[in-house]
Amino acid sequence: MNTAYTIQARSVTKIINFAATYGVTGQSLYQAVGLDPSVLDDPDNRIAFAQLVSLYEAAATLTRDDAFGLHLGENIDLRVFDVLGYVALNSPTIGEALERVARYHSIWQDGALLLLDVTGATARITYRYLDPSISQFRQDSELTLAAVAALGRLVTNSDWSPLAVRFAHAQPPVVSEHARIFRAPVSFGAESCQLVLDVSTLALPIARADPGLSAVLDRHAEELLAKHPHPVSVIDRVRSLITDELNGGDPSLERIAHRLGLSARTLQRRLREQGSSHNELLDQMRKDLAIKYLRLPEMAVCEIAYLLGFSESSALHRAFKRWTGKTPREFRGT
């Protein structure tokens, strides 16, 4: 089992407690995944993330609830996520809560990324596994997206629904619970797990957020993040190199692979294992930098096109229209 990626040991408790409502003992679950329960004695202990994901799968089997992850997700208490939960609960809006959760996610676990991306009128919450050893993850991924939806409705006192839900695993035999919980089109076999939202959902206020407490929690979360930083994944390294090369250099797959000391084929495989690709990362970096540069009135569009590696301004126009639904001129309001 890969022990390079970990999660707080206290994450086990919510699974054990929920499985107990089905009459399943904690001991049977510990035995199923080879987990020593004494690790739970110290709240600062961490366990292999892959072991926790396996525990979800074992719980679904032992409880005979094929939708165990969904059911736990819709009933979960935000406070079980410790500091991460309280940071989210005291954010002004659901969008800012998700941004904070994405930033501080490695405090809780570093075996998967939770990302928030806004494009035009839609927002995507992506849950992407970093640990390549994990192959069975249905229950964990369904719990995660169900918890985001259920907790998002609870803290905003709003009955919103996503526009779409996507899972990376194969479609299970029965999907009625997915339809009931998400109240949105659900698809399977996607590249990564995602909730797609109307961007207006991000502006929903969190009813009981405390701005003063939020600032205190952020400082504490930053201290914990220094102890448990995000793992430097191949995606992070490729993003950094693409940014470097986009300043008039060569951000091609071949060039990035060469700088990493890999073949282009090996780099593509490693990116694919983490649910991404060179083209996807390059496109996202160009979009982010285009928006940044266009907010600087002194920068001409032709200069921005050059810095982003486009052969001519018209190519930037087409790409920016695809990304945002607006031309660069419309985005600038001129």
Image: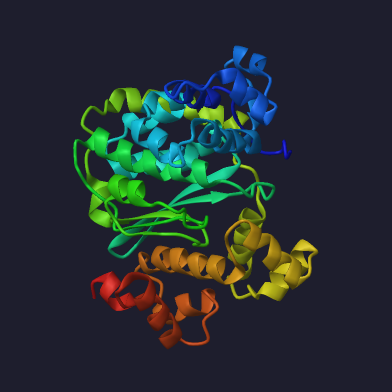
Tell me the residue at 26%/75% (across/down). Answer: 330
Is there any visible trace of residue 44 in the rendered image?
no
Placement of the C terminus among the 4 image quadrants: bottom left
Q: Position of residue 39 (x, y in %)?
A: 65, 18
Q: Position of residue 15 (x, y in %)?
A: 50, 27
Q: Nearer the viewer, residue 116 or 312?
A: 116
Residue 215: image quadrant is top left
Left or right: 294 in relation to 109: left
Residue 198: image quadrant is bottom left
Tell me the residue at 63%/63% (across/down). Answer: 272
Q: Position of residue 38 (x, y in %)?
A: 66, 14
Q: Nearer the viewer, residue 74 or 61?
A: 61
Tell me the residue at 62%/36% (across/down). Answer: 49
Is there any visible trace of residue 34 in the rendered image?
yes
Tell me the residue at 23%/27% (across/down). Answer: 208
Q: Nearer the viewer, residue 259 or 159?
A: 159
Left or right: 244 in relation to 202: right
Q: Nearer the viewer, residue 238 or 158?
A: 158
Q: Position of residue 264 (x, y in %)?
A: 73, 72
